[in-house]
Amino acid sequence: MYAVIKTGGKQYRVQIGNKLKVETLPVEVGSDIQLDQVLMVADGEIVSTGAPLLDQAKVSATVISHGRHDKIRIFKMRRRKHYRKQQGHRQNYTEIQITGISA
């Protein structure tokens, strides 16, 4: 059984036991959360899709940790103009573990 959920402007395909790094959620570490923006649920051959969301479906998860991704480098350069600009960025994330899918 798997589901497609939407959180933080992105879509994720999840199964029970999966660990995900999603955009930062304002919850405490160790707390349980309900993700109610479920786009699709599949159980074997039975597939349920929403238009765009399923009303009754929910995905439950536990917050494992908060952290920051690896740094990415942004480098801009104009050739022959002596223009170079370097910048770095680290995005915050919340790591969750999927504990249940209800359709």
Image: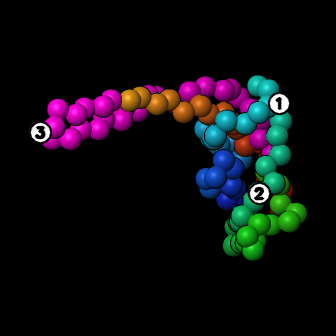
- Image position of 100 (left or right of 95): right
Residue at image location 79% in from the left, 31% down from the top: 27
Rounded to the nearest angstrom, the CA distance separating label 1 from label 2 is 19 Å
Mark 1 or 3: in front is 3
User: If the image is split into quadrants, where does the C terminus sit?
Assistant: bottom right
User: Toward the viewer: 60 or 52?
Assistant: 52
Residue designated by label 3? 80
**Residue type (three-letter) at the residue carrying disc 1:** Ser
Residue at image location 83% in from the left, 30% down from the top: 31
Q: Which mark is drawn over residue 31? A: 1
Where residue 43 appears, as percent x and y from the top left, is 73, 65
Where residue 38 appears, as percent x and y from the top left, is 75, 59
Rounded to the nearest angstrom, the CA distance separating label 3 from label 2 is 50 Å
> Which is nearer the N-term, disc 1 or disc 3?
1
Instruction: Tell me where the magenta segment starts and ends, as one range.
Output: 60-86
Does residue 64 show up magenta in the picture? yes
> Which is nearer the N-term, disc 1 or disc 2?
1
Circle 1 Cα neighbour tier, 10 Å, few/some/many (<14 / 14–19 / ≥20):
few
Residue designated by label 2? 37
User: Toward the viewer: 91 or 60?
Assistant: 91
Local SS, label 3: loop
Circle 2 Cα neighbour tier, 10 Å, few/some/many (<14 / 14–19 / ≥20):
many
Is any atom of residue 14 visible in this view?
no
Local SS, label 1: loop
Does residue 1 show up magenta in the picture? no
Q: Are marks 1 and 3 in contact (CB under 8 Å)?
A: no
